[in-house]
Amino acid sequence: VSRFEGVSMAPADPILGVSEAFKRDNSDMKLNLGVGAYRTEELQPYVLEVVKKAEKKMLEAGENKEYLPIEGLAAFNKATAELLLGADNPVIKQQRVATVQGLSGTGSLRLGAAFIQRYFPGVKVLISSPTWGNHKNILNDAGVPWSEYRYFDPKTVGLDFEGMIADIKDAPNGSIILLHGCAHNPTGIDPTPEQWEKIADVCQEKDHMPFFDVAYQGFASGSLDDDASSVRRFVARGIELFVAQSYSKNLGLYAERIGAINVVVSSPEVATKVKSQLKRLARPMYSNPPVHGARIVANVVGDPTMFDEWRAEMQAMAGRIKTVRQRLYDELSTKDKSSKDWSFVLKQIGMFSFTGLNKAQSDNMTDKWHVYMTKDGRISLAGLNLAKCAFLADAIIDSFY
Ligand code: PMP
């Protein structure tokens, strides 16, 4: 007998489990639109040229493998806050930002959640319905209570803005509102600038604190500044907030686990204390973060030529996804003989499209067409190429009707 007899089998992860099922499928038709990872037009993983260049430079510099400080690489922390907020943002000059390097977006969210659990015990975090599945896991494991606000309207396949505002207004004063900075996952639907202003109004009225999850800066629109404008809008109003950042998508550093948690607060004194407590939370969890990805980011951002090359590659990635999005829309609207309006595909932003396919229809996509996707109807356009758009449109139309 094993002392582990009582351990039950954990369910497969709803996103990463899709890749496992894909690997087991031997069909030539198979297409993996599950996980949000960028692929080339040949459907191969892509290492950015600028990353290879930075790595070459790092190797030549012969840097050592000593531990980083608990808060991470100083040059990275400076660069990441400046990329997020803009280098000349007054909050940076006034030293009102506590930035700690995290284990990519997930680890940074987790550190933020641990901070909330410790310093704002019992305060509820409101998350969008739907949201990236891991948000719930992160909050649950950190012991942070959460509830949902309305976000997606299946009737319009768009934003339920009234529902969203009503639910945020309804939350107890001083709640924490988790917001996707850009390219909402899984829906691809973002508030407009006017709607962001209204959300900020309600946050101020209700003394709510935003917690931005920024996993796609520069990857959604191709512009680092445009994709951070939601966060900057709130910061400009003097609202205190959390921001988790990730370099998985925009620099293609998925496995390097590089990101950051930033807390923008009202004074430099508070920022110093908050940072000290983030470090205190990090130390017993993982001691200090990995250096490789942090050096890549610091090198790329710190060198004007490499920075420009990065932006060009980011625009190319964002551009390829937009081209595929357009082609998929064209195929859907020509192939579908019903009067269904597919224009929502074009309105969505970022690497995903939320098709509106329900669980049974998503199962049909996989079982009959070998198209692997999450069961909420989300497809990753980053895993699609122009050649497969017609096939995918056939699969979607067949599954819908
Ligand atoms: N937040 C959102 C909304 C995401 O889509 C992702 C990536 N799928 C992340 C955070 C974090 O990813 P990572 O931990 O790889 O940075």
Image: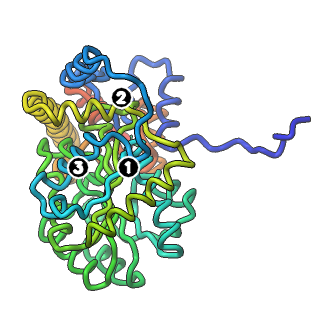
On the image, numbered disc 1 is attached to which residue? 357
Identify the image quadrant of the N terminus: top right
Rendered location of residue 269, percent (x, y): 31, 68
Label 2 crowding class (10 Å Cα cut-off): few <14, some 14-19, many 20+? some
On the image, numbered disc 2 is attached to which residue? 292
Question: In whole angstroms, how far apart are the C-alphas of marks 1 and 2?
Answer: 40 Å
On the image, numbered disc 3 is attached to which residue? 338
At horizontal 28% and vertical 27% (from top left) the residue drawn is 39
Question: In whole angstroms, how far apart are the C-alphas of marks 3 and 1?
Answer: 16 Å
Q: Is residue 327 visible?
A: no
Disc nearest the viewer among 1 and 2: 2
| Helix, strand or loop under label 1 | loop
Left or right: residue 383 compared with residue 6: left
Q: Ligand 1: does it lie within 8 Å of the C-beta at label 1?
A: no
Foreground residue among 2 and 158 = 2
Query: Which of the two discs, 3 and 2, labels the residue nearer the N terminus?
Result: 2
In the picture shown, does residue 237 fall above or below 32?
below
In the picture shown, does residue 108 fall above or below 263?
above
Question: In whole angstroms, how far apart are the C-alphas of marks 3 and 2?
Answer: 52 Å
